[in-house]
Structures are given as structure tokens and as C-alpha cells.
């Protein structure tokens, strides 16, 4: 049954991508929410089908719910940006949607990390190493993006570093975990974490590229339909794979 809801989610995703552009809309946000609901339902059905109701799997579902909230907040940010209401309240609210969207995704990744640790809590040394390596990786990524790609994070620099640190730490921890305890569930979580990281690298290009990039035509424009589609396909693939991982532990 889990894969039935994955298929339904794919249908909603296609409809969303057909409707979504750089301006966003209420309909696009609604369709995006339906896709997110499907990955949550996929996780719930997976838990029921596999008869696994432990805290680790509940935390994965909480992480997915945080992802859904982040989805909605970031898509509303895009939509409100197009309203062109030039007053301080609108600018402030636009920033709040971005901050809380990143916070929601960050909490989701904390849930994923805690979940994977609790399922095999003798890997505490690898968790510490993952945190240290994650910190080094995000600093390297930010250095490359700012110095070489000339990306401008502005007021979102610190939140971006914090969120990226959680992404990198989760991915590194899953590498350690799968090396020490291979299972199909761990493989799904590793693939999900990698796809999540790739998705947010694309998203950061959409949000923070240098000004002249937005003047390019075609798929090279960070806000092109192609870039938007790649970002969402990677992201939803990650969330559905994470949801399905519950079946295979």
C-alpha cells in the first residue's frame, strides 16, 4: 500500500510542477501541500504495514511533518514576493516565512538524526565525527558558493550555515551507519539524505545567486522552470525514500 501513495504523490507532483513557476500561486501551494501529505501518509502506512511503532519511526514521521510545514512556508514566501506590496510589513513577513521555513526543515533534520541514532545508539562516536565533518563540509560549501560562485546570502547567511550543517551531518552519519550496519532501510535513508542535500544546493542557487544570473535566459536562469523542477523532484524523491525506509528495517 505504501507505494500506492507514492504513485498518488507523483501525480500531485506533476500537477504542481505544471502549475508552479518563479511567481508561485495559492493553487501551486495547495498542490505542493498534497504532495507533502502523501509522503507523510506513505510513512504512516509503511509503519502500519511493517508493524513498527517505535520512537525512531515516530521521529521520522515528525521530521516529515516538519518538511511539509517548511514546504508551505517557503512556497507562500515565493507567492507573497510577487504581490509587490512595497511596505515594511510585507518585507518583514517575507523574511519571517523564509526564517521559519528553514527552521522547520532544520527541526525535521534534527528528528531524522535523533531517529537514526536511537535505532542504533552504539554509534555515538560516529555521531560526534559526523557533526565535526558536517561542520567542515558546510564551511567548504559556503566558501565555494560565496568566493567562486559569488552567491549572496545576505541576512540568511547564518541560518543557511546552520541548516546546511544539519544536512551535511545527517548525510555523513548515514554513511557511517550503513558502513557499520548495512540494511535496506539504512540504504534508503542514505539515498534520501543525499537527494535532500542535492535539492537544497539547487534551491540555494535559486535563492542566493548573483544578480546577473537572474538576467540569463533559458535553463541557466536560477529561477527557470527547469531549475524549479529539478529542485522539487530531488526534494520529493528524498522525502518519499525516507518515508519508505520504515518498511525495510
Image (spheres, rainbow, N blue to C red):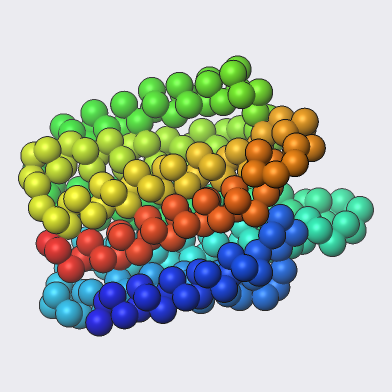
Q: Is residue 92 left or right of residue 206?
A: right
Q: Is residue 29 left or right of residue 167?
A: right
Image height of 55 relative to 234, above or below: below
Inspect this view and state whether residue 33 appears.
no
Q: Residue at x 30, y 71 (%)?
A: 43
Q: Which residue, as the protein is rendered here, is positioned at the far front?
A: 218
Return the x and y of residue 94 as percentages of the image width and height: 74, 54
Q: Residue at x 50, y 75 (%)?
A: 12
Residue toward you, 234 or 46: 234
Quarter residue 172 falls in: top left
Residue toward you, 10 or 103: 10
Image height of 98 relative to 67, above or below: above
Q: Is residue 176 left or right of residue 212?
A: left
Return the x and y of residue 128 as percentages of the image width and height: 24, 32
Q: Is residue 191 left or right of residue 198?
A: left
Quarter residue 146 falls in: top right
Image height of 147 relative to 22, above or below: above
Q: Which residue, as the protein is rendered here, is positioned at the far right?
A: 86
Image quadrant where one finds the N terminus = bottom left
Return the x and y of residue 45 as percentages of the image width and height: 26, 79
Q: How many marks?
A: 0
Q: Residue at x 72, y 33 (%)?
A: 213
Q: Residue at x 41, y 48 (%)?
A: 196
Q: Which residue, as the protein is rendered here, is positioned at the far top?
A: 147
Residue toward you, 167 or 192: 192
Inspect this view and state whether residue 17 appears.
yes
Amino acid at each position: 500500500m505504501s507505494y500506492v501513495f507514492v504513485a498518488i504523490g507523483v501525480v500531485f507532483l506533476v500537477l504542481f510542477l505544471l502549475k508552479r513557476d518563479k511567481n508561485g500561486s495559492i493553487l501551486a501551494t495547495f498542490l505542493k501541500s498534497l504532495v507533502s501529505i502523501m509522503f507523510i501518509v506513505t510513512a504512516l502506512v509503511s509503519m502500519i504495514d511493517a508493524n513498527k511503532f517505535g520512537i525512531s519511526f515516530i521521529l521520522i514521521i515528525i521530521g516529515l511533518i516538519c518538511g511539509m510545514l517548511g514546504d508551505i512556508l517557503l512556497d507562500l514566501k515565493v507567492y507573497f514576493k510577487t504581490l509587490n506590496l512595497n511596505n515594511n510589513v510585507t518585507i518583514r513577513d517575507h523574511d519571517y516565512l523564509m526564517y521559519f521555513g528553514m527552521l522547520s526543515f532544520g527541526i525535521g533534520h534534527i528528528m531524522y538524526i535523533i531517529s537514526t541514532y536511537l535505532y542504533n545508539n552504539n554509534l555515538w562516536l560516529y555521531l560526534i565525527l559526523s557533526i565535526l565533518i558536517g561542520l567542515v563540509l558546510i564551511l567548504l560549501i559556503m566558501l565555494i558558493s560565496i568566493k567562486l560562485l559569488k552567491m549572496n546570502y545576505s541576512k540568511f547567511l547564518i541560518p543557511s550555515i546552520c541548516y546546511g550543517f544539519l544536512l551535511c551531518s545527517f548525510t555523513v552519519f548515514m554513511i557511517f551507519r550503513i558502513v557499520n550496519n548495512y540494511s535496506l532501510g539504512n540504504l534508503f535513508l542514505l539515498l534520501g539524505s543525499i537527494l535532500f542535500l542535492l535539492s537544497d544546493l539547487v534551491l540555494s542557487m535559486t535563492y542566493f545567486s548573483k544578480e546577473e544570473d537572474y538576467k540569463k535566459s533559458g535553463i541557466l536562469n536560477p529561477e527557470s522552470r527547469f531549475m524549479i523542477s529539478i529542485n522539487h523532484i530531488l526534494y520529493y524523491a528524498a522525502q518519499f525514500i525516507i518515508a519508505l525506509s520504515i518498511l525495510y528495517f
